[in-house]
Amino acid sequence: MDKLRQLYFDYVDTFKVDGKLPPMMELKRIHTALVVDNAKKIAAAEKFDAHTAEICTLAALLHDTGRYEQLKRYNTFKDSDSVDHAVFSHDIVKAKGWLDGLEAADREAVLKAVLYHNRRDLPEGMPPLMDTAAKCVRDADKLDIFRVLENQIATTDWRTDATAFWNLRYDLPPNPAVIAAIKEGWPVDYQNIRSLADFVLIQVGWMRNGLYFAASRRFARERGHYDYRRKFLLDLIGYDIAELA
Ligand SMILES: [Fe+2]
């Protein structure tokens, strides 16, 4: 694990300019460290065995490997304008041979957890270790994305700077199609995202149906992510997410 951490951070360091990572890349490096931390906390709370916990941690460390090269090459983190960053991450990890010393089952579990981390759904019938690693990374990632949204709201002039949230309107009520999907527990179709409220509601949907582990749901509550969104949407457009219940 230590050796792989070293390989990973040495790789990240290759993107430094004048001894510093560009700010957008630095945000990804911080995100990665926090996703690793979340994965460890989920593994501990769910009492994964030591080996499973290590595979989950490793997958968390590598899940966004491709973000640096994506930004360097395409100057965006938007997958639809560049590459699917999970595929990109998977391919880079594989090409670098970082996992070559692992048992085949462990290597495949890590690679697939990276590859599937941004998919709408996970394939059925994966081997148990792969399944656990994939679910753990997805939960750990979402938990940190909750933090990122709150950070984004706190640190940008999103009311005047439309690009803070991809030009989404902030003064529109939620799309009824989004509300319906969340109520029914269906994944939200990204086509239906028209407003900042819809965007925030997607994450409320994750908290209700999108987290696999009870520990992840507990962390989301304990960290105040649900209450934050409830207050935010009430203040923004007078919509109470308690109505979803
Ligand atoms: Fe990602």
Image (spheres, rainbow, N blue to C red):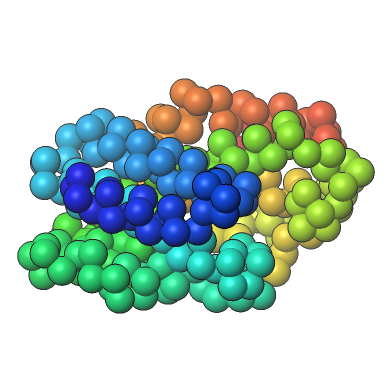
Split into 4 quadrants, where in the image is the C terminus? Answer: top right
Q: In this rendering, would 193 be left or right of 12? A: right
Give residue 190's quadrant in the image: bottom right
- Residue found 59% across the figure and 41% down from its top: 148
Q: Position of residue 118 (x, y in %)?
A: 47, 63
94 vs 40, nearest the viewer: 94
Of 137 and 203, the residue lying toward us: 137
Q: Residue at x 86, y 52 (%)?
A: 162
Residue 63 placement (x, y as % from top left): 38, 58
**Residue that appears at 59% across and 73% down:** 73
Residue at (28%, 55%) from the top-left corner? 7
The single residue placed furthest to the front in the displayed view is 18
Nearer the observer, 73 or 16:
16
- Position of 47 with respect to 162 (left or right) is left
Position above or below: 153 against 80: above
Using the rendered image of the protein, determine whether residue 91 is visible from the camera's viewpoint.
yes
User: In the picture shown, does residue 134 fall above or below 91?
Assistant: above
